[in-house]
Image (cartoon, grey):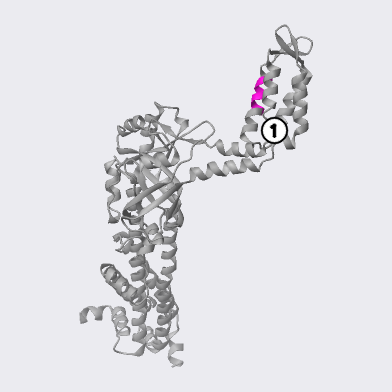
Amino acid sequence: MKNLLSRYISLSLALRYLNPLRTFFSIITLICLLGVSLGVMVLIVVLSVMGGLQKEIQGNLFAHSPHVQVCYRNDFGVREVIPDWVELSDKLRHVPGVQSTYALIEDYALVDVQGKQRPCFFRAIDTENAAQLEDLKHLIVSGNADLDMGEKAVISSIVAENMGLNVGDTVRVYTTRNFQEISHAYQQTELPLLAEKNAAELNDLKKWGKSLKAEQGREEASQASVDQAFATLNNLLAVPRRDTERSSLLDMIGLLNEGEALEGGKVAFPEGTGKEWEAVLAEFSAEQRNEADMECFRKIKELVMPKDLEVIGIYRASQHTPSPDLFIPLVIGQELLGYEDDVVQAVALRVDDPYHVETMLAPVMQALEKEKPASSWVLETWHDRFNSWFELMQKERMMMSFVLSFISLISAFCIMAVMFTVSIQRKREIAVMKALGATPFQVVRVFLWQGVIIGFIGALLGVGLGLLVLEYRMQIQMFLAGIGFDPFPVAFHGTANIPVVIDWTEIAWQGVKAFVMVVVASIIPALITARQDPARSLRSM
């Protein structure tokens, strides 16, 4: 060893300067070494935990969310229900790469628990799909997920905590369908009656009906009067109207459309058109406002009654990711939305490789083209639905890496300051070395070796400490939680254990990055020191 150090005088001097038993300066060097280690350790721990959380979130999403949703949209781009979903589901199940298919219904509802109410997002699934229920069972923290055709529900841990629910309790679910129907009826009653606000226009329409003349088994009117009647009806329809009044106005337009143009600017209508016209106009009455208001509520097609559901299970949910508040059987979801037994909102697919789900879109679309035109179908992957969440996590991870890298950067600046201090304290020794014939590169190597040793040992020690912290992360978390500081609360990430992903490439990169920063920081003072004049340095001592 001594022979080796005698050959490499630069390395020998670097080790002597780093000897912690020689001077107070060496203690500062050890502090810088500890700074590099802590910087690497913190980066490895944070990035590994965030990678584990991302993987855990993806696993939870795959457990309760479909990999692909097949929806149908009409020519206007409006989403419509899918009738006869069983037949469509059977065809999609035979597409290569598809594990299983099941029906899907999603909507919002109002949940009532002993007068305490909360809006909740529910997902109704086909309980006969064993794969879907099996994945859901892995998230259960209390009770079970044995949903069947009965009035049962599996709720999220967030809802259970907020509403004080336990397994065996009962929740009452009110569908928003009732609210929409009732709200529409109430808005109808606030509209003025046509007979009150547009009495003059109705009077003109009555005069037109009386102006019809019976001629040879038909009734005639001038083209100008017909055009005027059309214009009046279109103006009345141009503003919001009650449903019953709008329907009557459309009936009157239908009567006008039955006219046949004749020579001489006349229009012929079937016999009895005048009486039908007067019968429709008789429906507009300003004296029976209460009856008209009640008619708005009688137009409600169906009043869906609330459902009392038994909580049979509570599944683990995270505030970090979106997830349904309730899982209910498909038949209950159909009843809440007023659907028939064979009607659903979408058909969900689970594929063999959800991480490359895009490769499944083309064969699935080919199978759908046999049913309806491809332009009518919309395929929505799990990545499309939750892309913003994963982008947010990725940006958060990048930002954390950027911010925490400043710890290593500060350590590098400290090492640079230490090297400048070395050059001042060892100014005479360096001058003697140069006077005895040492080249500037040999002087640079003294400081470069110090940077290499500190960077290598610091990075290696940081990697070791990082892996040690990850190994005993739960014990550390329990200790910190015991003193009132919990860096990873269960309510936030939704898991009792802190997940981690050991990415050796990432770990190696953090170690190499810290090593390079320290080496670069040591080169700058080395280059400045190597340019000093030895004679001037000795005279100034």
Task: Give the magenta-colored segment's residue range.
Answer: 249-256
Q: In terms of depth relative to the viewer, which is nearer, 526 or 255?
A: 255
User: Does 498 lie within the magenta span?
Assistant: no
Q: Nearer the viewer, residue 400 or 178?
A: 178
Percent coordinates x, y for residue 145 in the rendering: 29, 49
Q: Is residue 150 left or right of residue 116?
A: left
* Location of residue 279 in the rendering, given as x and y in whole percent from the top left corner: 67, 23
Mark 1 is surrounded, within 10 Å at the Cα level, by few (under 14), some (14 to 19) or many (20 or more) other residues, namely: some
**Residue type beneath disc 1:** Ser
Q: Residue 371, image x and y in percent?
A: 40, 27
For image coordinates 45% across by 45% down, the residue present is 107
- Please tell me whether residue 354 is drawn above or below residue 482 in the rendered image: above
Q: Residue at x 46, y 92 (%)?
A: 540
Q: Quadrant of the N terminus?
A: bottom left
* Number of residue marks: 1
Q: Is residue 58 visible?
A: no
What kind of element bears circle 1?
loop
Percent from the top left, x then y, of residue 162?
41, 61
In depth, the one of 8 and 317 nearer the eye is 317
Q: Is residue 356 visible?
A: yes
Per the picture, the main secondary structure of the magenta-coloured stretch is helix
Horizontal placement of 465 versus 404: left or right?
left
For disc 1, the marked residue is: 285
Residue 156 versus residue 217 in the image, above or below: below
User: With respect to residue 330, does 373 lie above or below?
Assistant: above
Q: Nearer the viewer, residue 536 or 267?
A: 267
